[in-house]
Image (cartoon, rainbow, N blue to C red):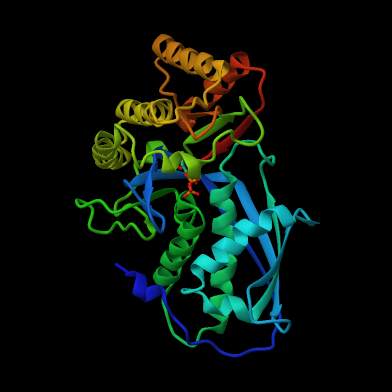
């Protein structure tokens, strides 16, 4: 276990070198949802996610000595195009992690990012984006540090810093399953960074599929950050916390024993709870669309009629993630074709 202090390090080589670095990080889909947080990105409850295989952010950075001034100095590009709109969020991130990465001021960063999935498709791009950017910073830190640390330290520090950018980004470092948030019964878990389960995942979950139905493309109506804030005074806050702590233990047990029927129960309960919390906050809001509900009903009907173990989960949006075992892929893909005319991104966990 690492503490916050372990990630504060100030001993670096002085160098006039220019670094050309590339890193890639996946998106992830939460099975047990992170919803609600305390100051400094401490989650209200533990969360568990699958890491996706194809939905990724690739980030390149040219990092040269910062001669112009000794403040944070960078430029952000998306697919080669300068994006000043994105820069305040990244600047805030750099400022928030300066304590753990003081070398940020010594360099000028030209950052260029791209996603393997369509922009504004509703796939959580902040998770993969902050994870990829943080990987770049850690690649740099590894080259300029004068201390000797092992890979476990670097992985945890990557997750630790990515978490400060976006909570769910902490879970985009380890794969195929990631747990973020301290659970008293799981000694190896932490609020500061995500970890892998300390057991082998059951083979039924190998290559588990996630077909993402893009019910609604474009910017979210209410940001996750605003949604987390509404949990602070939520009437169901304590009940939700208890449920998430319990579901974390249950889902990990399921990921070990491969009980797909129980998996469906927990995953769908978590998705519906997330949206129920939004619908019962002050102010309340609804992110599901009519088609989201239609798809949910059709999935349940198809499951009842065929016995195929597919289920749905939702992010903070209208899109539906359809999760199913690799052995059912052919029939589920056929079913999905009849289900909607909306765009579907076929991913799997890895
Ligand atoms: C509904 O990680 O996007 O996807 O920490 O404010 O950046 P910030 O929030 P974010 O919240 C994700 C919420 C969620 C559930 C989850 O991924 O666990």
Furthest toward the bottom, the residue is: 14
Q: Nearer the viewer, residue 145 or 202?
A: 145
Task: Tell me the residue at 50%/66% (across/down).
Answer: 96
x and y percentages locating residue 202 in the rendered image: 34, 41
Tell me if residue 50 comes above or below residue 284 in the rendering. below
Tell me if residue 96 comes above or below residue 39 in the rendering. below
Task: Tell me the residue at 49%/34% (across/down).
Answer: 315
Instruction: Examine the rendering and report whether any part of residue 313 can be seen.
Output: yes
Q: Nearer the viewer, residue 194 or 273?
A: 273
x and y percentages locating residue 247 in the rendered image: 28, 37
* Quadrant into which the N terminus falls: bottom left
Instruction: Examine the rendering and report whether any part of residue 349 can be seen.
Output: no
Q: Quadrant of residue 84?
A: bottom right
Tell me if residue 47 comes above or below residue 263 in the rendering. below
Please tell me how many numbered marks the rendered image carries: 0
Q: Nearer the viewer, residue 340 or 125?
A: 125
């Amino acid at each position: 276990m690492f503490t916050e202090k372990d990630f504060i390090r100030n001993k670096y080589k002085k160098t006039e070198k220019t670094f050309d670095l590339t890193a890639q990080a996946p998106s992830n889909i939460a099975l047990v949802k992170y919803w609600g947080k305390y100051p400094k990105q401490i989650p209200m409850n533990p969360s568990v996610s699958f890491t996706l295989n194809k939905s990724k952010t690739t980030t390149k950075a040219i990092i040269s000595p910062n001669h112009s001034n000794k403040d944070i100095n960078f430029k952000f590009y998306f697919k080669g195009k300068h994006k000043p709109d994105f820069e305040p969020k990244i600047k805030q991130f750099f400022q928030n992690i300066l304590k753990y990465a003081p070398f940020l001021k010594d360099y000028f960063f030209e950052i260029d990012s791209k996603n393997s999935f369509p922009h504004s498709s509703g796939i959580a791009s902040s998770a993969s984006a902050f994870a990829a950017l943080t990987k770049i910073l850690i690649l740099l830190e590894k080259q300029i540090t004068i201390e000797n640390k092992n890979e476990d330290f670097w992985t945890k520090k990557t997750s630790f810093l990515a978490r400060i950018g976006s909570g769910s980004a902490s879970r985009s470092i380890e794969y195929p399953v990631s747990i973020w948030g301290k659970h008293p019964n799981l000694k190896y878990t932490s609020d500061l960074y995500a970890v892998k389960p300390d057991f082998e995942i059951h083979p039924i979950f190998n290559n588990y599929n996630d077909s993402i139905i893009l019910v609604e493309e474009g910017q979210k109506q209410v940001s996750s950050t605003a949604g987390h804030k509404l949990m602070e005074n939520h009437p169901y806050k304590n009940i939700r916390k208890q449920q998430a702590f319990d579901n974390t233990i249950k889902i990990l047990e399921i990921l070990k024993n491969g009980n797909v029927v129980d998996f469906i129960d927990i995953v769908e309960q978590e998705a519906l709870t997330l949206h129920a919390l939004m619908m019962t906050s002050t102010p309340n809001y609804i992110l599901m669309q009519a088609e989201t509900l239609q798809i949910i009903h059709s999935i349940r009907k198809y499951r009842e009629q065929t016995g195929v173990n597919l289920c749905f989960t939702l992010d903070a949006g209208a899109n539906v993630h359809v999760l199913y075992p690799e052995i059912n892929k052919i029939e589920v893909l056929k079913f999905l074709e009849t289900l909607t005319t909306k765009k579907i991104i076929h991913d799997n966990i890895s």
